[in-house]
Image (cartoon, rainbow, N blue to C red):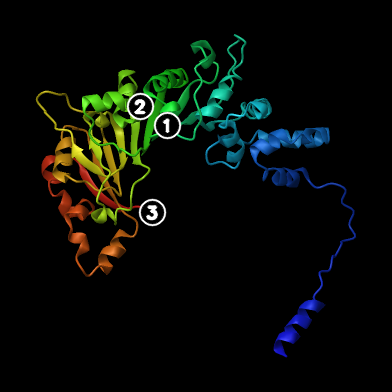
């Protein structure tokens, strides 16, 4: 009876439309702009709504003029940009025309641009051919490019003169290289150097360089013999770091990331571990971030090599360190190192408190405890050792 009563009440419910007897021919422009602002940049550029009326076209131009950031990787229009990475001769012309339309409408306003290699290569084709000094992106200040696995191929058909008309006086350039066992067809040391030379034309006098290397190779980034490094140089972190150093580029940020990294709580159960070999060249930056379990460390011969004065901060993110004392010794010839930050795995404190079997007394977990870094005050007296917890 109770259920039948509920169903009867639901059947009797009706929606009632109440219309106010007020004449309202048009919405205020501010309301229309707010509604149009919810539409993604690419859709707004390609919808063709400018033909509705001159007033509506002015509203669309106002909304577009407020867009400062375009992201082809994680932005709202990432599906559109992902299609450009797919080789399809039939649809390529249509996609190129759409992209050209988007660039023409947004380029005067953008200050922050994130692209993959394929989209960047397409945009280089839109560089103005005139010699009047006009730029494709006149107000761009921050540029982030992704190359390698799943990012499409880079172009090589552009001169230095054309490159200088893409943009100029950038404050920040970030390069992310996605390496895998199949990425060699998309990125290698040769076209990486070409890319870095191209990007150097965009950089201002006081710009900031950042390099992020992500590893999804089966071999991992352990120590390479000279023969191995010659054969596998296109998938080795150290090859790209050395390429940057050889070009005279000073890195403010270097990130080394293992895309296949296991949970730090499971490493004691791993039969085959993935470890990073710490080459001395990794210290040729101001800020070093490592999201990779660290294995063998390159020996340091202080009397035979100069100090790494540029290194000021090292950040280990939820990463195991096999030889902690060796790593401290590795950092001891960085006289300006002010901070060694250890980011513990998510929920670390809670897990340690709940554990009653002493699992976290294992030497593998010493890298997340203060007792594991007892040599820091001795070897690095000017360096602050700080523990923080990663966000989940």
Q: Quick one: label 2 or label 3, which is nearer the N terminus? A: 2
Residue 21 at x, y percent in the picture: 90, 60
In this rendering, would 193 be left or right of 59?
left
- Cα gap from disc 1 to disc 2, whole angstroms: 8 Å
Q: Residue at x 78, y 82 (%)?
A: 8
Secondary structure beneath disc 2?
helix
Q: Which residue is mark 3?
A: 391
Farthest residue, direction top: 131
Q: Is residue 345 visible?
A: yes
- Compare marks 3 and 1 and give the one earlier in the sequence: 1
Q: Is residue 270 above or below residue 99?
A: below
Residue at 31% of width from left, 35% of height from top? 287
**Rendering coords of residue 51 (x, y %):** 82, 33
Where residue 191 is drawn, which disc sits there?
none
Give the number of the mark in front: 2 or 3.
2
Q: Residues within 10 Å of mark 2 (few under 14, many from 20)?
A: many
**Which residue is more in the foreground, 11 or 61?**
11
Residue of label 2: 234
Q: Secondary structure at mark 1?
A: helix
**How would you rate the neighbour count of disc 1 (Cα within 10 Å): few for under 14, some for 14-19, many for 20 or more?**
many
| Residue that mark 1 sits on | 183
Between tags 3 and 1, which lies in front? 1
**Pointers 1 and 2 in contact (C-beta within 8 Å):** yes
For mark 3, does the 10 Å Cα neighbourhood hold few (<14), some (14 to 19), or many (20 or more) residues? few
């Amino acid at each position: 009876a109770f259920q039948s009563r509920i169903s009867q009440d639901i059947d009797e419910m009706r929606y009632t439309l109440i219309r106010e007897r007020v004449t309202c021919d048009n919405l205020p422009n501010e309301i229309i702009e707010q509604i149009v602002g919810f539409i993604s940049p690419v859709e707004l550029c390609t919808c063709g709504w400018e033909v509705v009326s001159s007033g509506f076209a002015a509203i669309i131009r106002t909304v577009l003029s407020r867009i400062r950031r375009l992201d082809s990787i994680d932005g709202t229009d990432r599906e559109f940009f992902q299609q450009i990475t797919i080789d399809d001769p039939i649809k390529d012309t249509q996609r190129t025309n759409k992209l050209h339309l988007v660039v023409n409408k947004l380029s005067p306003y953008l200050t922050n641009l994130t692209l993959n290699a394929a989209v960047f290569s397409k945009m280089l084709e839109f560089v103005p051919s005139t010699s009047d000094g006009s730029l494709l992106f006149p107000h761009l200040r921050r540029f982030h490019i992704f190359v390698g696995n799943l990012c499409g191929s880079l172009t090589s058909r552009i001169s230095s003169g054309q490159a200088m008309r893409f943009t100029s006086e950038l404050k920040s350039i970030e390069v992310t290289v996605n390496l895998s066992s199949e990425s060699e067809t998309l990125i290698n040391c040769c076209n990486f150097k070409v890319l870095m030379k191209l990007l150097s034309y965009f950089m201002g006098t006081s710009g900031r360089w950042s390099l992020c290397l992500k590893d999804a190779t089966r071999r991992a980034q352990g120590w390479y013999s000279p023969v191995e490094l010659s054969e596998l140089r296109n998938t080795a972190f150290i090859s790209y770091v050395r390429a940057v150093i050889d070009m005279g580029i000073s890195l403010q940020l270097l990130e080394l990331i293992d895309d296949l990294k296991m949970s730090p709580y499971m490493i004691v159960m791993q039969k085959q571990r993935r470890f990073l070999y710490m080459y001395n060249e990794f210290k040729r930056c101001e800020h070093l971030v490592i999201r990779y379990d660290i294995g063998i460390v390159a020996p340091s011969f202080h009397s035979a090599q100069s100090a790494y004065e540029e290194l000021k901060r090292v950040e280990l993110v939820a990463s195991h360190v096999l030889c902690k004392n060796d790593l401290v010794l590795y950092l001891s010839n960085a006289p300006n190192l002010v901070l060694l930050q250890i980011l513990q795995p998510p929920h670390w404190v809670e897990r340690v408190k709940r554990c009653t079997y002493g699992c976290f007394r294992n030497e593998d977990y010493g890298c997340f405890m203060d007792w594991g870094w007892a040599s820091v005050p001795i070897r690095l007296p000017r360096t602050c050792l700080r523990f923080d917890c990663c966000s989940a």
